[in-house]
Image (cartoon, helix red, strand yellow):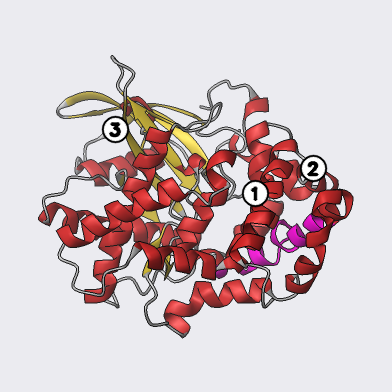
Amino acid sequence: MTENVDSSQFNADELDPPAWLNAEFIEGALRAYEKHPELHVTDLKISPATFQGDHYASIMFRAVCQYSTVKGKFSKSLIVKTMPEQEGHKKDMLSQSPIFKTEILMYSKALPEFERILREAGDATKLYAPCIYHSLEPRQVMIFEDLVPQGYSVIRDRLATKEELKKAFFKLAKWHAVSMKVLNEQPDFLKELKHGMWGMTTFLNDPIVTTGITCFLKMLDKVPELTKYKPYFEIIRNNYMQQMGKVMEEYRTDPQPNRYYVLCHGDFHVRNMMFKNNKETGDFEDVMLVDFQISNTCPITIDLIYSIFMLMDSEERWDLGKEYIDYYFSVLAETLRKVGFKGVMPTLKGIWEHIHGHKDYAFFMMTSMMPMMAAMKANAFKLIYVLLDPETKQKTYFLDEYLRDVKKLLPKFEELGYFENL
């Protein structure tokens, strides 16, 4: 049943589908979705859906099925997303997490309502791809229509263009604006979407997160022009995670006045986007955001700061992505007006004040997440070794691209006053 594939390109736990992922299972899902009780799957081919480094917090398969109904014969390509079943680090880290419950809520509740509000305002923006099946019991699984046959693809071997990035921020701004309206008018509607990264306790206690600052300090020791910054990070190393936690949870525990709260994507980087170009002209047409497993209600800055470190390239990052953040705000404000937002309108000045105010999150992104992204872009190490092997992880802190960024960012942070009153 599994297609022949070059195993070296894929994650080991996606080479062999679980026994339950068979024609009978796909047939049941398609019957319910297409409302054809006589639908029968006649052929099924399963292969890995993604390449190494595309994702970590799930396993994904592509299921190409041939099926028949009373109306004729059909073919459909599906993406099946489920929890890791092989014993190991990934299963240990994710088995008790709420990520599937969160993503199911996003597809079944939040995003449909967001699109409904946009349509009501005359806005045809598409925020998500169809989910044709989901369940939490007896196993956590979701099935989506495959976007690849529709012309979408993941960017792997190049940087996203300015046009592509602006479209991604356009979609995010629309999403944020509608969620701001929903939070203002129906504050309980999104209350279940409360976990985000801070709902993944095992992840927060994993060396992926906990050793980042230590690796960063070792790097500062060995790069003479950066050593002067070491005392600042020695000061914050014991409490910056707690400070971040307060920001992540403040909407529910201690909401602040004049703060911009939205439903954040939570993992807004290029591998969680699929881009579409016109098949005939090659012109860029659309981007679709995917992977909503850690979406949650929190300050607007969580997605914006994350994007600075995980989505933008070095040149854009050095001024904290001003061009993109300013563009994002213009779409946010326009959409808020279009959908009839009745709350206090955000300002561009306020957006930037909040970004600078959440410096602990910027420190976390720079010290823990950005080296991993640099390794992925450089194709220097396999992601699994970066995550699991301490020596490999430490090497990512000395990659040329990462050091070049840090040498620009630390003086920028100093100029902005990030190291004052630590």
Residue at the spot of label 3 = 40
- Circles 2, 3 touching at the beta carbon (< 8 Å): no
Dot 2, crowdedness within 10 Å: few (<14), some or many (≥20)? some
Q: Which residue is the extreme one toward the bottom? A: 254
Q: Which residues are magenta?
A: 198-217
Determine the residue positioned at 68% across, 26% down: 8
Does 367 sit above or below residue 164?
Answer: below
Query: Which residue sits furthest front?
Result: 415
Q: Is residue 224 left or right of residue 101?
A: right
The answer to which of marks 3 and 1 sits earlier in the sequence is 3
x and y, in percent, of residue 186 in the image:
24, 75
Which secondary structure dominates the residues rendered in magenta?
helix
Is residue 70 found left or right of 20 in the rendered image?
Answer: left
Residue 211 in magenta stretch: yes
Kind of residue indicated by mark 1: Met
Query: Mark 1 = which residue?
Result: 370
Residue placed under numbered mark 2 in the picture: 398
Q: Which quadrant holds residue 13?
A: top right
Q: Is residue 1 above or below residue 26?
A: above
- Please name whichever residue, 119 or 111, is drawn nearer the observer in this view of the structure: 119
**What element does badge 2 sit on?**
loop
Residue drawn at (67%, 73%) of the image? 420
Q: Is residue 81 magenta?
A: no
Please tell me which residue lies in front, 352 or 301: 352
Question: Alpha-carbon neighbours of circle 3 within 10 Å: few (<14), some, or many (≥20)?
Answer: many
Q: Secondary structure at mark 3?
A: strand
Pointer 2 or 1: first along the chain: 1
Q: CA distance from mark 2 to mark 3?
A: 55 Å
Residue 313 in sight in this render: no
Under mark 2, the amino acid is Phe
Examine the rendered structure and indicate whether residue 72 appears above or below residue 313: above
Question: Which residue is painted at 33% across and 59% down in the image?
Answer: 176
